[in-house]
Image: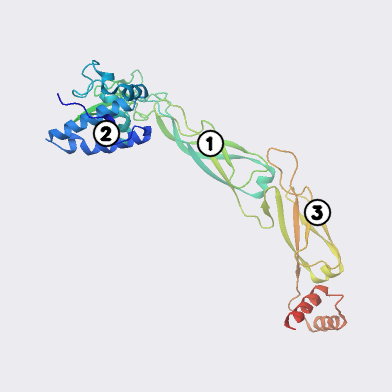
Amino acid sequence: MMSKRDYYEVLGVTRTCSDGELKTAFRKLAMKWHPDKNPGDQSCEHQFKEINEAYDVLKDGQKRAAYDRFGHAAFDGAGGAHGHGFGADFGSAFSDIFEGIFGMASGRSRSSGRERGADLRYNLEITLEEAFHGKTAQLNLPTNVTCETCSGTGAKAGTEPIQCRTCSGSGRMRHAQGFFTIERTCHTCQGRGSVIENPCANCGGAGRVTRERTLEVHIPAGVEDGTRIRLASEGEAGVRGGPPGDLYIFLSIKPHAVFQREGADLYCRVPVGMVTAALGGEFEVPTLDGGRTGVKVPEGTQTGKRFRLPGKGMPVLRAKGRGDMYVQVAVETPQKLNKRQRELLREFEKQSSDATQPETAGFFARMREFFE
């Protein structure tokens, strides 16, 4: 009898190889020497059996340790499982690569038929005022709901689903291909294991029908753009009495005519006349709570000056208090002046000095130093 080759030599790996290296080597050789790829070649069949036998031993930690110590003698007298055909352990050895090649695993349990309903998404746009105060919104959703006629079973009243005759209730079908036995979902019952011979006339056997539902959802004060609200079990009804999915509401906030928002703070830009900025004064700005607040402008205010109004911003979600409001001043230059206004401005210019316009004077002084 021809002596067996060393298992490590068969797989082309070293004795110190890792489990991952062992599995990769086996995959490559199994694909190369598979009899279905080499029909009629007896040598390929022998090679395929040999690499399967080697991998079946080395992939098991205890078997590998015994083989490293005693060699092939460790398995003498164990029966015909190694070296003669595929033996009882063939399926366990090749199952390690079976899922990676075909995207499926043997021994899957069949579906119960009660499939969970799909999750739903609803995009809801609200105003900044609604985000400030919070609101209760009514949503009209066309969705699948449980059929009331059959209570979600899909079967006609007085009947029940029967065991699938094609797969005998297992939900799976086996097909032999060469040395493989491949399991697939039963095409008759779609893996449920049962079929409906007398479907419900209202839902056609689906156990659910399309209806428009009206839901109320509470939008808390202080929500931000992009906030997601989950309503558990408010999605589509499940198939044949399965649990419903969830409803996810995604909020977006409309752009506001006055305010921009950053977190809990509000920002607005207010134009101020040149005279008010020069002499000082006061103006009012609205607040989102429906009130007004005054802003004092000190004498000599420049464009870009920002005033902070504490506690006048947005409510803080899931916390007490409010953010702040920031008012930025933009000094407006007069336009379309009449003759008298021009004369007054020119007279003012003649009376002006570096003291009245220190920023301008300082800038041009630096410019002169640069050119000189």
Tell me the mark number nearer the camera, choosing from 1 and 3: 3
For mark 1, give the secondary structure: strand
Q: Label 3 near label 2: C-beta < 8 Å? A: no
Q: What residue is at 76 percent from the left and 58 percent from the top? A: 327
- Front residue of 157 and 365: 365
Image x and y of residue 154, in percent: 36, 26
According to the picture, the residue beneath numbered tag 1 turns out to be: 214
Query: Quick one: label 2, few (<14), some, or many (20+) residues within 10 Å?
Result: few
On the image, the x and y values in percent for residue 236 come to 46, 34
Name the residue type under label 2.
Answer: Glu
Residue, disc 2: 9
Mark 2 lies on a secondary structure that is: helix
Give percent across and percent down for residue 61: 37, 24
- Disc ID at residue 293: 3
Q: Nearer the viewer, residue 209 or 301?
A: 301
- In the image: residue 77, left or right of residue 222: left
Instruction: State which tag comes first along the sequence, 1 or 3.
Output: 1
Q: Position of residue 316 (x, y in %)?
A: 70, 42
The image quadrant where one finds the C terminus is: bottom right
